[in-house]
Image (tube, rainbow, N blue to C red):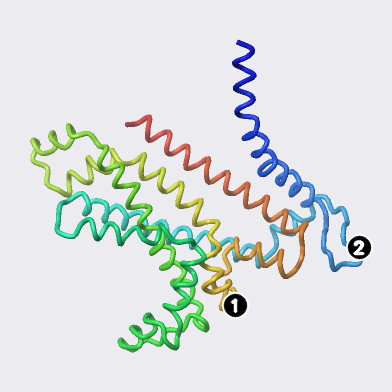
Amino acid sequence: MKENRKQVWGLIAPTLFLMIFIGVIPVIYVIYLSAFKYNVFAKIPFRYTGFNNFRKLVFDPDFLKSLRLGLTFVALCCGIELPLGLLIANLLTLNFKGKGIFRTIMTLPLAMAPISIGSIWVLITNPDFGPLPFLFRKIGIEYNMGINANQAFFTTVLVDIWHWTPFVVLTFMAGLTSLPNQPYEAALVDGANRWQTFRYVTIPLLKPVILTTLFIRVMDTFRVFDEVWMLTSGGPGTATRYVSIHLVRMVLQSMEYGYSSAMSLFLLYLTIIICFLLLTFISSSQEAT
């Protein structure tokens, strides 16, 4: 029995060591830095300030604006991706000519790295030779996200939808194919039409999958960086400076390591709260079903 325990601990020890080295130690160091004013360009680069960084964070208009932009970005992307993904997943459960080709083409964005996605859309949205500005000019709209803040914001939303809707489709397809047949047979006997069946049978049965997919997408969208950084670098102005972009800019430009550490901890705490709320909804929905 003791030998088995030693074998088990011997197998999991490398993983535990890696998790502690990569996950726990950096968090402890960030907590330590958050209590200091640490700027390499200051006369006194390292000075203890206690909770002053967190107090500064609450009243920082630039951070609050980036946080508001980030949450708006999350709400728009998830609010469009989930209904669109559910619609496409339902269509892909039907048999039609070219279904396999469409499904293959649809999942191609998932095979690309986020930084590659950003580079592709830099070319697509180029005001001189990009196809998107060309199409907008055909309908009388001047498209240049380098100077138009609203266009830049909605372009980043469009890029995220294009990149990650296939993931939502795949998760919903997996959920739809695993649903039991009995409720659908009962609905057919009761004379329910297709919309009623979808609303009162499919949606309730698919609720755990929907909430789990929402959980994943909220977490991913909230920390979006690569695509937006390649596409706009947070501009024009602060139109697309989401909270993840703002944090990186604080580290790279201002060199405010202590303040940036406090910001990171605040975002970690906010992410944990969002995760807790979504997991509560998921568990309650699974108990209800």
Q: Which mark is residue 62?
A: none
User: Which amino acid lies under the numbered mark 2 shown in the image of this protein?
Assistant: Ile
Answer with the quarter of the image where residue 17 lies: top right
> Residue at 71% across / 46% down in the picture?
26
User: Which amino acid lies under the numbered mark 1 shown in the image of this protein?
Assistant: Gly
Q: Nearer the viewer, residue 279 or 190?
A: 279
Spot occupied by residue 97 in the image (x, y as percentages of width and height): 14, 59
Q: Which residue is mark 1?
A: 237
First of labels 1, 2 by sequence position: 2
Image position of 156 (left or right of 46): left
Image position of 41 (left or right of 279): right
Q: Nearer the viewer, mark 1 or mark 2?
A: 2
Secondary structure state at the residue bearing disc 2:
loop
Q: Residues within 10 Å of mark 1 (few under 14, many from 20)?
A: few
Spot occupied by residue 87 in the image (x, y as percentages of width and height): 26, 55
Q: Nearer the viewer, residue 203 or 17?
A: 17
- Asked if 245 appears above or below 206 in the picture, the reply is below
Spot occupied by residue 132 in the image (x, y as percentages of width and height): 38, 80
Q: Alpha carbon of mark 1 to alpha carbon of mark 2: how far?
A: 31 Å
Q: Which residue is mark 2?
A: 44
> Residue at 37% across / 58% down in the picture?
165
Q: Nearer the viewer, residue 202 or 168?
A: 168
Spot occupied by residue 178 in the image (x, y as percentages of width and height): 27, 37
